[in-house]
Image (cartoon, rainbow, N blue to C red):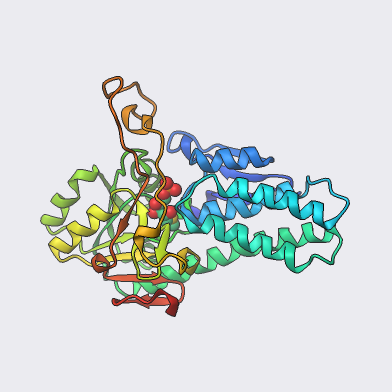
Amino acid sequence: MNVDITDLKTVRLSQDGSAVIILDQTRLPGSEVYVSLSSAEEVWEAIYKLKVRGAPAIGIAAAYGIYVCSRLIVANTYDSFYSEFLRMKDYLASSRPTAVNLVAALDRMEKVVVAHSMKPVPEIVDLLRVESEAIRAEDAAACRKIGENCLSLLRPGMGILTHCNAGHLAVSEYGTALAPVYLGEERGYGFKVFADETRPLLQGARLTAYELQKAGVDVTLICDNMASVVMRKGWVQAVVVGCDRVAANGDTANKIGTLGVAILARHYGIPFYVLGPTSTIDLNCPDGDSIVIEERNPEEITDMWYASRMAPEGVKAYNPAFDVTSHDLITAIITEKGIAYPPFHMEDF
Ligand code: MRU
């Protein structure tokens, strides 16, 4: 690769543990600016405003965030510490609803607090740091394995289409959907990637095109409504996307527009692969209808990013941030534990 993409630090903990440091993704691709978050409000706002985004990355940010904030809790007893911890946990969990990784990471952190209730509060806080670092390290290891598993299904020279950003910027390192692309690049596969721009917030244009280009991968940016054309021309041999929540039956929530890409892929006979860590599987959700889809500010549709308004004043706008791709449109779901083919039984992971 041209550049070691891990130079970009999506989300990390400051050395002294007093702050979560994120690369502000709302400033990309123009500037690489790191911001320090040291209160629950700052962490909440960074997640809500997509300064840090992508299912695994928001889970890691929330885990680090609750550790940083737990250090600030003034409590004489375990009970008062725990009740303040729970208040912060609920608050951070309310920042975004769809990606299960956010709540899953916070639940893991709570388990540490509960399991060590007999210990002095400062010791519990130290253990929270250890757990948050473990969540990050497990994510990095999972991404690498997801990449290897998916690469076994790909061939050198393939054209690969992706939607949104499920790359290095969405996780601790490497990515999920982009992990096989990076591994392939290291091994000389010469993939040609088509990145959907991903309206309305342009994660494909601003983030996927940015990180792939920086890494020296052959990437071509297309508008969302061009995916059918590049498929029809025979330029795409596989679609790889990430996921925010995978239901027990394999229905998968991912960035709005993913469903349309899956339908196109089916039409053109192109395999459609969903890549994600097992932490994104939610067995409490039987199917896609039970997944809460975030609805965001209509201004994200009516006003262009960085530019002036482009839709008439007062027009109604519907702005779901995710959609659900029905399991019957998915060729395979690839996690760090292996590759699942239909019929999907996610409990087998
Ligand atoms: O709204 P975002 O940018 O957080 O949406 C991100 C996605 O939909 C990603 O594809 C998903 O979180 C997987 S990231 C590895």
The residue furthest left is 233
The residue furthest bottom is 348
Residue at screen point 81% across, 56% down: 79
Is residue 253 visible in the rendered image? The answer is: yes
Location of residue 316 by image quarter: top left
Q: In this view of the protein, which residue sits in the foreground, 91 or 138?
A: 91
Tell me if residue 189 comes above or below residue 303 in the rendering: below
Residue at screen point 79% across, 52% down: 81
Quarter of the picture containing the C terminus is bottom left
Residue at screen point 55% across, 40% down: 46
Tell me if residue 19 comes above or below residue 307 in the rendering: below
Location of residue 28 by image quarter: top left
The spot of residue 203 in percent (x, y) is 38, 44
Q: In this view of the protein, which residue sits in the foreground, 124 or 335?
A: 124
Tell me if residue 21 comes above or below residue 245 in the rendering: above
Q: Is residue 293 left or right of residue 87?
A: left
The spot of residue 210 in percent (x, y) is 39, 44
Is residue 173 visible in the rendered image? The answer is: no
Quarter of the picture containing the N terminus is bottom left
